[in-house]
Amino acid sequence: MTAGAVLVASLGSVGVANAQPVTPAAPAVVAQAGAQAAAPEFVAPGKTLKIGAKGNEVKVLQGRLKELGYAPGKIDGRYGGATQAAVWAFQKVNGISPTSTVASRTWNALEAPKAPKVLVPGGKPTRVEMNLAKQVMVLYVNGQVKLISHTSSGSGIPYCETANWNGKVQRFCGDARTPTGDYKTTWRRSGWHKSYLGQLYNPIFFNGGIAFHGALSVPLAPASHGCVRLPMNVAGMLPSLLGKNVPVHVRGKFVR
């Protein structure tokens, strides 16, 4: 079991076969059904923002990230941890070295965003793709990008830890890897779930004891025992978006 897992909740069965995933497009690219013209283009305010910033520019940033499928938390004009994690995810998808500072390069990318790389082109229209190289998770629903999140997967550093489990002190060892492969979501728990390696928030398991779950620490580098850690706000919303028996595809390798 990992001390970092990703939670996925019930979305229901999918009847569309092999639809090609479509990433969220900027308003200038996709018009609403029946509209005569495309929505106005997004124009970035351009002001450099850092953690702790407040104001309308932060609200614009949050709104744009949410529109593109990222999860910046509450649209409240306050640049906190949830918004930082969404910024990191966006930067990684767009080939920008992740930083909490939102400056010209990130604003420019928000005006002309890239879609996440599709890891399984022929995959089911509802599925999860976990990109270990970029430490990004993408949830597709009915062929559309529904959620893109920053993650922290298995560190790859072998461990041995002692814990009181099932009434006795036991020693657990492992390689702290998040294995690549094709899986499906299985069982889950709501709220905090105690494992022998730590606490997992809203875990959704997809490979034995490996799960998507919320964690209080989701650093830029892989740091878990093997699970996929998610920001707490993402773990809070994921159960209502992703159900049981949904394909999970894990690909890539993180290079430190």
Image (cartoon, rainbow, N blue to C red):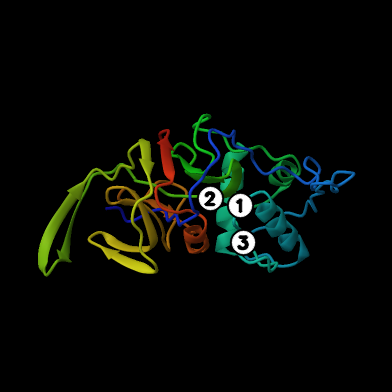
Q: Nearer the viewer, residue 190 or 18?
A: 18
Q: Nearer the viewer, residue 98 or 12?
A: 12
At x 79% / y 50%, what residue is drawn?
44
Label total for image? 3
x%, y% of residue 125?
A: 54, 39
Answer whether labels 1 and 2 touch (C-beta < 8 Å). yes
Local packing at callout 1 (Cα closer than 10 Å; few below 14, some 14-19, many 20+) is many
Work out whether 48 lies above or below 155. below
Q: Quadrant of residue 145?
A: top right
Residue contact at pointers 3 and 2, CB within 8 angstroms:
no
Residue 256 seen in render: no
What's the residue type where badge 1 is placed?
Tyr
Q: Which residue is mark 3?
A: 51
Circle 2 sits on which residue? Answer: 149
Q: Earlier in the sequence, mark 1 or mark 3?
A: 3
For residue 102, the mark is: none
Local SS, label 2: strand
**Amino acid beneath label 3:** Ile
Image coordinates of residue 175 in percent, x first then y, are: 24, 43
Q: Which mark is residue 70?
A: 1
Q: Residue furthest front?
A: 15
Q: Residue at x 66, y 67 (%)?
A: 78
Frontmost of labels 3 and 2 is 2
Q: Residue at position x 86%, y 48% from top? A: 40
**Mark found first going from the N terminus, 1 or 2:** 1
Q: Amino acid at mark 2?
A: Ser
Marks 1/2: CA distance? 6 Å
